[in-house]
Amino acid sequence: MDLVLETRHINKYFKNPVLFHVLKDISFGIKKGEFASIMGKSGSGKSTLLYILSTMDTDYEGKLFLNGEMVSGKPHSELSKIRNKHIGFVFQFHYLLSEFSVLENVMLPAKKLGAKTNGQIEHDAMEKLRMLNIPHLANKRASRISGGEKQRVAIARALINDPDILMGDEPTGNLDSYNAENVFNIFKDLKETQNLSLLVVTHDEDFAKRTDRIIQMEDGKILT
Ligand SMILES: Nc1ncnc2c1ncn2[C@@H]1O[C@H](COP(=O)(O)OP(=O)(O)OP(=O)(O)O)[C@@H](O)[C@H]1O
């Protein structure tokens, strides 16, 4: 089976103020081209899990694999490169640099990766903006566009290094229903046309029901 992401027996504890077992023996995999959602009540551990899966949190027990390669235990400097190249991340808040143009925002992760010339990066960034139907925003300041447009720019930025998996922490949480539907359709399109894997934490049942699989979390455990 072609797993883009896999966890084996992940356990996590918070030690403040008392020992708290927040993630309990989490084992699952995400296949290439799979669009999965994570649902669960507030406090069930969704964000904590996503932080580990995206390699931002390394303080846990168990193993994490990306494209079959074990990434748990690697040093932070290496993880930062792996993350930038293989994982795209979209948050509830867009985190765009407001004084920069839309194009500059999308180009940033590729500049950080340093694998291409500026000209190539600009070309790729324009391609992502076209894919998301917003090429006309390229030279606008990020502070001067609407909330729905900002989220589409954030998705373009998450895709600039052609990641293997796109993760989202409530990426439609701040959007009205029209823009939330837009983002869902973009994700579905990425799965269908690019065979991209997607893993999205959401509170929106309507959104989750239309993904390939719902990973239900309760009290730090996976139910399904
Ligand atoms: N740094 C921390 N120290 C101690 N406990 C924490 C810490 N961060 C989170 N927690 C606790 O861990 C549990 C899981 O939190 P988490 O944010 O992962 O939940 P969630 O399912 O994402 O919730 P929500 O849907 O509200 O975002 C909660 O009980 C939370 O209070």
Image (tube, rainbow, N blue to C red):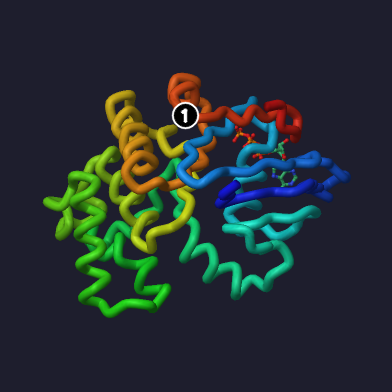
Q: Splitting the image into four quadrants, where does ligand 1 fall?
A: top right
User: Whole-percent x and y of residue 213?
Assistant: 54, 29
What residue is drawn where x is 74% and y is 41%?
Answer: 26
Q: Is residue 37 above or below residue 190?
A: above
SS of the residue under disc 1: loop
Q: Is mark 1 within 8 Å of ligand 1?
A: no
The residue at the point 68 percent across, 30 percent down is 217
**In the current view of this chain or complex, which residue is farthest to the front?**
1
169 to the left or right of 194: right
In this picture, residue 174 sits left or right of residue 144? right
Q: Percent x, y for residue 12?
A: 78, 48
Give residue 221's position: percent from left, percent from top: 75, 33
In this view, the residue in front, 131 or 18, is: 131
For the point 41% across and 73% down, the residue is 112
Residue found farthest to the right:
19
Instruction: Examine the image and state in which quarter residue 23 appears.
Output: top right
Determine whether, in the image, residue 59 is placed left or right of residue 21.
Answer: left
Residue for point 38% across, 63% down:
161
Q: Where is residue 163 in the image (x, y as percent from the top left)?
A: 43, 57
Q: Mark 1 points at which residue?
A: 211
**Three-letter amino acid code at the position of disc 1:** Thr
User: For residue 210, which quarter of the picture?
Assistant: top left
Q: How many numbered marks does the figure carry? A: 1
- As displayed, is residue 87 above or below residue 220? below
Q: How crowded is mark 1: few (under 14 residues within 10 Å), some or many (20 or more)?
A: some
116 displayed left or right of 103 = right
Q: In which quarter of the image is the C terminus?
A: top right
**196 and 161: which is toward the camera:** 196
| Residue 2, above or below 221 | below
